Image (spheres, rainbow, N blue to C red):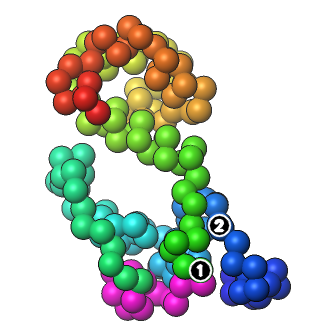
Amino acid sequence: MKILMEAINYDKFKWQICGDLKLIALLLGLQQGFTKYSCFICEWDSRARSLHYSRKDWPARKSLEQAIMNVENQPLVERSKILLPSMHLKLKVIKNFVKAMNQEEAAFTYLQETFPRLSEAKLKEVVFIGPQIRDLIKDEYFDRLLEGNVKAA
């Protein structure tokens, strides 16, 4: 990656970078694969399963120091030059939203009825595509079925 960055003269132009989250992690020097601290924004602990979807605030990552919190290499770009891809954000927000829903509520049952071609496994792991997300956001009936904290989210 370093050779590629030199070949395109990144140091000279200092472009903004928008790419896949794995590419962004690579450019920021994070270890690849199934790591404990995979997020370049915060210190989210991917192995703390009991805290997933219940803990709301994770501490922000203060630095990208080598050998600390899965930082393997020196960052090739500044964090301020990173733009997050909007589709990844939408997919992650919807995934977290649906996983946090109570599966016994009417809104979750409505999801199963609205997307009958989604297998139970895909619905459990929240595998949606862009058009399905857009349809869900625009669906006024689904919005009326939501209650409490889920509606606020």
Magenta region, residue range = 65-76
Q: Who's the residue at 46% across and 23% down the image?
A: 137
Answer whether labels 2 and 1 touch (C-beta < 8 Å). yes
Identify the residue under disc 1.
77
Can I make out residue 47 in this image? no
Can I make out residue 54 in this image? yes
Quarter of the image where the C terminus is located: top left
How many marks the image carries: the answer is 2
Quarter of the image where the N terminus is located: bottom right
Q: Secondary structure at mark 1?
A: loop
Badge 2 local density, few (<14 within 10 Å), some, or many (20+)? some
Q: Who's the residue at 57% across and 60% down the image?
A: 83
Q: Alpha-carbon distance for marks 2 and 1?
A: 9 Å
In the rendered structure, which disc, 2 or 1, sits on the residue that comes first in sequence?
2
Which label belongs to residue 141? none
Q: Quadrant of residue 87?
A: top right
Is 69 one of the magenta-colored residues?
Answer: yes
- Amino acid at pointer 2: Ile
Residue 8 locus on image (x, y percent) = 81, 80
Is 67 one of the magenta-colored residues?
Answer: yes
Q: Secondary structure at mark 2?
A: strand
Which label belongs to residue 17? 2
Horizontal relation, residue 72 to residue 147: left or right: right
- Amino acid at pointer 1: Val
Q: Who's the residue at 54% across and 57% down the image?
A: 84
Q: Main secondary structure of the magenta part?
A: loop
Horizontal relation, residue 14 to residue 41: left or right: right
Badge 1 local density, few (<14 within 10 Å), some, or many (20+)? many
Q: Who's the residue at 56% across and 46% down the image?
A: 86
Q: Quadrant of residue 112?
A: top left
